[in-house]
Image (spheres, helix red, strand yellow):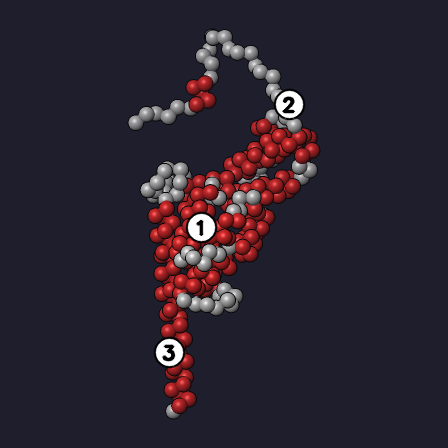
Amino acid sequence: MPIQTNPDRARAPTKGFATEPPRMRRRLGVAERERQILDSAIGFFAQNGFNAQLRDLGRSIGVTHALLYHYFPTKQALIDRVYLEMFEGRWNPNWEILLDDPQKTPEEKLTGFYDDYINSALNREFTRILVFSGLSDHAITDRFFSLLRQRLFPRLIRETRRFRGVTSRAKASERELELLMGLHGGFFYITMRRWIYGQGVANDQAPERFSHSLVRDRVRGYLLASQSLFAQANTSTASKTSGRKVKLNQ
């Protein structure tokens, strides 16, 4: 097996040989500098969490503390931009179009959504930043879950009911939501295994992607559990109702 070398070390000049003179650093425009700070902050917070000092962020990208605050007056202002970039900015309107498509089955919709969601949205920075936010002030997690409750969860509940043959548009019950969170949270845990715990995840495709079969199996398990559990609940309710009618007739 070939040994992977450190590319930075491989490019380092050999001691004793002449090197090229340093190039003049190009002065960045306002938009470019702001983009540089934002991109660096995403990686910085993903690696160090939100208790890290912005002074260290500035030092890592070669800008002064004063210049950093010129673009982002407070640390919270920078965190807010990170949220907009990494969470709201990565929301794909096509997900809603897919889930609202009347021509597709619930299994096709959920599998298609989660296959794209776990591979396009739940990258290393997204996963680690969400975890760090949950361990600090919840500012990002609260906003993100509010987005999910508005734009995603109602659609998933609707499709789950459709799979069970239920047409009710009533507010989701706690049981329905908990079952759904088992599915949704399970996909996030897959990314945590990779990006937090450093563990491998079974894959039948390219190493950089999460497996389509893994997504499909979890969606099928969720839908079957939903149909089975709620069928049992309906049977139990019907039995109790039938029992009450017998007593009343007696």
Image spot of residue 47 (x, y percent): 51, 36
Q: Which residue is mark 1?
A: 113
Q: Which mark is residue 182?
A: none
Query: Disc 3 and disc 1: Cα gap in Å?
Result: 37 Å
Characterize the local packing of mark 3: few (<14), some (14-19) or many (20 or more) Cα atoms within 10 angstroms.
Answer: few
Residue placed most toward the observer, 151 or 134: 151
Characterize the local packing of mark 1: few (<14), some (14-19) or many (20 or more) Cα atoms within 10 angstroms.
Answer: some
Q: What residue is shown at x 46% (from left), y 47% (from top)? A: 117
Tell me the kind of residue under disc 2: Arg
Tell me the kind of residue under disc 1: Phe
Asked whether the beta carbons under mark 2 and mark 1 sit within 8 Å of each other, the answer is no
Q: What residue is shown at x 46% (from left), y 56% (from top)? A: 101
Q: Which residue is mark 3?
A: 239
Q: Which residue is mark 2?
A: 27
Of the numbered discs 3 and 2, the one sitting upstream in the chain is: 2
Tell me the kind of residue under disc 3: Ser
Asked where in the image residue 209 lies, by quadrant, the reply is: top left
Asked where in the image residue 9 lies, by quadrant, the reply is: top left
Query: Disc 3 and disc 2: Cα gap in Å?
Result: 76 Å
Helix, strand or loop at label 2? It is loop
